[in-house]
Amino acid sequence: MDAYDGFLVDFDGVVWLGREPVPGSPEALATMLAAGKEVVFVTNNPTKRPAEYAERLRGMGVEVGPERIVTAGITVARLAAEAAGPGGSALVLGFEPLRELIAGEGLRLVDFEAPTEADVVVVSGWREFSYMSLLAAKQALDAGAALVATSHDPTMPMPGGEWPGTGAILAAVEICSGKVAEIGGKPERHLFELALSRIPAAKRVAMVGDRISSDIAGGHAAGLDTILVLSGTTGSDGGSEDQAAMAVKPDLTVANLAALVA
């Protein structure tokens, strides 16, 4: 911990698994903040608003404001607005917080019954995804809409094993439409640039995450040192990424967040 004055920290698989905190993570984060470290949380999961994430952290004893939480929903909403243009419209495969962010960028939200009115299709993790929403996305894309998504993450770490993630839904949309999405979240630059702009005084910043293909690869591309924790996608029981088989390597590997402050 003492080697850095700032950290970008992933949520799922690092701070918590589902509804349960990773053992020792709340205490580790509180220790980092008490030591004056600049911390921004970066997540590809836009299912909650930053204020809701901040409230959840507060309930764990970690005091941060919503401005220290950057979700892929924020960056993909900006990409959607750029793709659609002024006065544009969007078909959103995602939960209400993501829909709010996209509407907040000035886009009109299109119903699934009128998909060809959309200028852009936005894809994220969504438990209500169905064949009919896939059909609507294809119809919108066939009519010329652009395609953006929060991530390519195929899974999400959860207690008892991983669940399908945004990438699983996006794969179906890309395959049936022949379109390739622009990604707003990790490992692309957008989320890292926004997060780093929140802590401009931090001179040496490390990315802390559990997924090599997004957290570690994206951190390297952003010019950051990277710290892999083995409490989520990589190294956990049922985790889908094998560290030894990955071409990208972290600068440091630890069991969990608590190991950073031990």
Image (tube, rainbow, N blue to C red):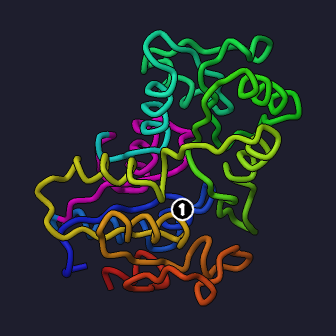
Please state the horizontal and vertical placement of residue 138, each as a whole percent of the image.
79, 30
Quarter of the image where the C terminus is located: bottom left
Magenta residue span: 37-66
Give the residue at x 47% y 35%.
49
Quarter of the image where the N terminus is located: bottom left
> Which residue reaches farthest bottom?
244
Give the residue at x 73% y 44%.
174
Give the residue at x 65% y 37%.
123
When asked about the image quadrant of residue 75, the answer is top left
Residue type marked 1? Trp
Give the residue at x 76% y 18%.
112
Taking the image as shown, residue 216 lies to the left or right of residue 17, namely left
> Which residue reaches farthest right?
131
> Which residue reaches farthest left?
201
Taking the image as shown, residue 38 lies to the left or right of residue 218, namely left
When asked about the image quadrant of residue 117, the answer is top right
Q: Secondary structure at mark 1?
A: strand
The residue where tag 1 is placed is 16
Q: Nearer the viewer, residue 21 or 148?
A: 148
Taking the image as shown, residue 8 lies to the left or right of residue 215, namely left
Q: Nearer the viewer, residue 258 or 11?
A: 11
**Would you say residue 42 sits in the magenta stretch?**
yes
Rendered position, 195 above or below 249: above
Please state the horizontal and vertical placement of residue 255, each as a whole percent of the image.
49, 84
Please state the horizontal and vertical placement of residue 202, each as a whole percent of the image.
15, 61
**Would you say residue 44 sits in the magenta stretch?**
yes
Please state the horizontal and vertical placement of residue 196, each as a whole percent of the image.
25, 53
Rendered position, 244 above or below 53: below
Taking the image as shown, residue 36 lies to the left or right of residue 215, namely left
Rendered position, 118 above or below 181: above
